[in-house]
Amino acid sequence: MAFVKPPPSPNQNRASMVVIGVLFFIFGFVTWLNGPLITFVKLAFNLDDVNAFLIPMVFYLSYFFLSLPSSWVLRRTGMKKGMGFGLFVMAIGAVIFGECATIRVYPGALTGLFVIGAGLSLLQTAANPYISILGPIDSAAQRIAVMGICNKVAGMLAPIVIGALVLSGIDTLDQQVKAAPTPEAREVLLSAFAAKIHMPYLVMAALLALLAVWVIRSSLPEVSAEANVSADDSAGDAAPALSRAPHLWLGVLCLFLYVGVEVMAGDAIGTYGHGFDLPLDETKFFTSFTLAAMLAGYLGGLLLIPKVLSQERYLALSAILGVILTVAAFATSGYVSVGCVAALGFANAMMWPAIFPLGIRGLGGRTEVGSALMIMGIAGGAVLPQLFVQLKQHYPFQAVFLALMAPAYLYILFYALYGHRVGRKAVAEVPSLA
């Protein structure tokens, strides 16, 4: 990617923040549709939990396969054209999903989600390093927190919108399907239900295409990847070989686990609540509760980072809170347990804003490839939820939830205290959490 330094004008930087903020809104809305889509496909396609959870698995695996190709595309197209291309790809995926879901062809619907994920991979590979190095790398978490607010507001809206347009009265429909006198009558009910997804996804496709045109025509400046060197990094270390950047590889694993726990707390919370036999008309909205907690966490991060706490220390405190809430969810039941899972949104909120800049810190001219590797870590959102639905068939679901989540948060704590400094200049002692 050919980078030039962005103009120093504050107005232009604010305009850039607006453009990237809109993109993060899109990230959030499309990504957090997965939770209610699990509920949708489970009924529309008559699936068990394992097959319904192919929704997040396919979506997040697209990041693993396409992040590095995305970095190559961005090098050739430049940032604005690359992001516009990504939005067009997402529009194509939305059309494929809408059409195939309507006619109830599940492999086709999954293909559409994979294509949407491909477009998002391109956007994320560009937008995350862009916002990280738009200003000083040491305050990147604060800038990403602003983007996170855009992301999570959209995420809160996604289940509400899809719930109102598609999932309204799903408990009644579920009972009608079970009571259908003939297989033909059941198919008529399910086909009518599946058809409700068609128009929302066609409208979304049209909006994505319009946004693509807007981004390409915007005044978004390019940024210099060489700017990705903090005050603590020497000039000679500005572009280390990635094999000599262990903090990056440890960061990829950290992001893998973080996205896994984020999706577990967001997309899987409905299935978790259903384990207590809570009604579908309630569980379809649980993702919004997690996103509301995440929004509160972002607001807290904005107030505290970096003036009160460094992004490393805030990450450590968030990981500790994640362990506490996970244990509390295991020790309780019903709505209280679900509330603990939703509250994990607060613990998770500032993890991405802290982990991502720590992982790419000091990579200089190799920032694009390092960022793509970090984006590949989003595949954790495919693996942990699928492990959850597989294992809960054989073990109590709360015990499975604890066994997956607690070790992930403990590793994130390790990265916050030690991992991000491995292979880099750092003080000898562990930073305090004060």
Image (cartoon, rainbow, N blue to C red):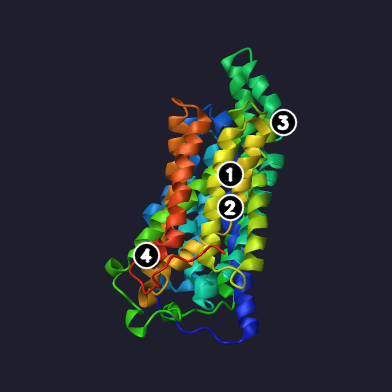
Residue 78, given in percent of the width and then of the height, sits at: 44, 74
Location of mark 3 (residue): 169
Residue 47, given in percent of the width and then of the height, sits at: 51, 28
Say whether disc 1 or disc 3 marks the residue closer to the N-terminus. Answer: 3
Location of mark 1 (residue): 325
Q: Residue furthest top?
A: 181
The amino acid sitting under disc 4 is His
Of 177 and 281, the residue lying toward us: 281
Give the CA separation, mark 1 to mark 4.
27 Å
Location of mark 4 (residue): 247
Task: Reply above or below: 134 against 193.
Answer: below
> Disc 3 or disc 4, which is closer to the eye?
4
Q: Which image quadrant: the N terminus?
A: bottom left
Say whether disc 3 or disc 4 marks the residue closer to the N-terminus. Answer: 3
Give the CA separation, mark 2 to mark 3.
32 Å
Give the CA separation, mark 1 to mark 2.
9 Å
> Disc 1 or disc 4, which is closer to the eye?
1
Secondary structure at numbered mark 4:
helix
Say whether disc 1 or disc 4 marks the residue closer to the N-terminus. Answer: 4
Say whether disc 2 or disc 3 marks the residue closer to the N-terminus. Answer: 3
> Disc 1 or disc 3, which is closer to the eye?
1
Of 308 and 128, the residue lying toward us: 308
Badge 4, how many Cα within 10 Å: few under 14, some, many 20+? many
Residues tagged 1 and 2 counted as in contact (Cβ below 8 A): yes
The amino acid sitting under disc 3 is Gly
- Identity of the residue drawn at 30% across and 68% down: 242
Location of mark 2 (residue): 347
Badge 1, how many Cα within 10 Å: few under 14, some, many 20+? many
Task: Reply above or below: 372 against 185.
Answer: below
Secondary structure at numbered mark 2:
helix
The amino acid sitting under disc 2 is Ala
